[in-house]
Amino acid sequence: MKLPLSDISDHEILASRPAWNSPGIDRPYEFLVEPERGADGAIENVATIFLTNRECPFRCLMCDLWKNTTVESVPVGAIPQQIDYALERLPAAQHVKLYNSGNFFDTKAIPKDDWRAIVDRVRGFKSVIVENHPKLCGDGCLEFRDLLAAHGVELEIALGLETVHPEVLPRLNKQMTRDDFSQAVTRLRGAGIRLRTFILLRPPFLTEEEGVEWAMRSIEFAFESGVSCSSVVPTRAGNGIMEQLENEGLFSSPLLASMEIVQERGIQLGAGRVFMDTWDAQKFATCAECARDRIQRIADINLNQQVTPRIACQKCGTR
């Protein structure tokens, strides 16, 4: 593992950024429906709406979600309008994710005055999943939980843990500790809120082998803390500063083989659901012959949470 001589600052991260996408606020920047295995074992459709709102105040080193955010807070009414736009165009689903490229309970991103209008639009779903920083899990989480519960809708919150590596986590500029994560989980679990977490596979400063090892340690820590689901995200370049780290030999994206290993080992823990993010997974493959089948296998395992035999490839020798 190699580390930079000093922490990378907000200023350096911002100065390295490429152009924003400048999305409009009248619609979400993306929306889709896909099946997901729930905590009860049922496979049901989940609508994911990627809301357009103000950028997250935390400048995480690896994040590129800011590309589809705004500089200023969106006006009251914009978020419900975006939800309407997506739901009018999506097929039926039993659950909905309201992902906003940051923190749902940051009132400068999602106006609190919109909460009741949001609840009115999602009241037909079984559950609503939002994302949030562990240090922003205050009384608002409980208040929104109660608004949903009045209509029989469960709240689930996705917290970014990223990694428990004691030297790498501070270098990610996430401005939180393992204890911050554990305390947030304890509080929210005590309030009856279901939790999932995001884990990075091979964040900056780790070798391929270290990336696998610390992804597993992070998954284990998350489950021990009390989350019911771990979503593993292969770390990518694309935000400017990550390309700089790549050029300096401080970062490389993980291999498809490492994605397979972490998914298999995570599920074999038997502690909860483990999902491996397959978005743009072709980039992590080294063999074009078997990549498609291997990525499909990962997607199938995500759905069934059962480890199946590896794909054999005569060209690259993968087994």
Image: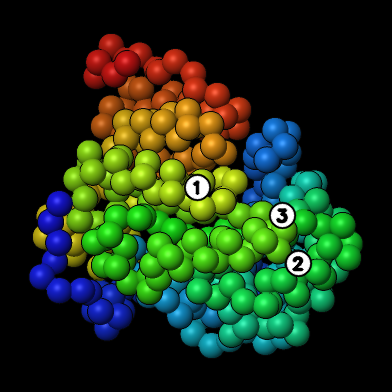
Residue positioned most to the right: 151
Residue kind at label 1, given as amino acid type: Glu
Q: Which residue is mark 1?
A: 224
Q: Nearer the viewer, residue 151 or 121?
A: 151
* Mark 2 surroundings within 10 Å by alpha-carbon count, few (fewer than 14), some (14 through 19), many (20 or more): many
Name the image quarter holding residue 289: top left
* Mark 1 surroundings within 10 Å by alpha-carbon count, few (fewer than 14), some (14 through 19), many (20 or more): few
Give me the residue at 55% from left, 24% from top. 306
Name the image quarter holding residue 302: top right
Name the image quarter holding residue 138: bottom right
The image's mark for residue 145 is 2
Give me the residue at 20% from left, 56% from top. 205
Q: Nearer the viewer, residue 310 or 180?
A: 180
Label 1 sits on a secondary structure element that is: helix
Residue 285, given in percent of the width and then of the height, sits at 31, 34
Q: Which residue is mark 3?
A: 96
From mark 3 to mark 2, how far is it between C-alphas? 14 Å
- Label 3 or label 1, whichever lies nearer to me, is 1
From mark 1 to mark 2, how far is it between C-alphas? 24 Å
Q: Is residue 291 left or right of residue 128?
A: left
Q: Nearer the viewer, residue 183 or 277?
A: 183
Residue 158, given in percent of the width and then of the height, sits at 57, 58
Give me the residue at 59% from left, 46% from top. 228
Label 3 sits on a secondary structure element that is: strand
User: Where is the C terminus found, in terms of image quarters?
Assistant: top left
Residue 287, given in percent of the width and then of the height, sits at 28, 27
Give me the residue at 15% from left, 74% from top. 6
Contact (Cβ within 8 Å) of mark 1 with mark 2: no
Residue kind at label 2, given as amino acid type: Arg
- Label 3 or label 2, whichever lies nearer to me, is 2
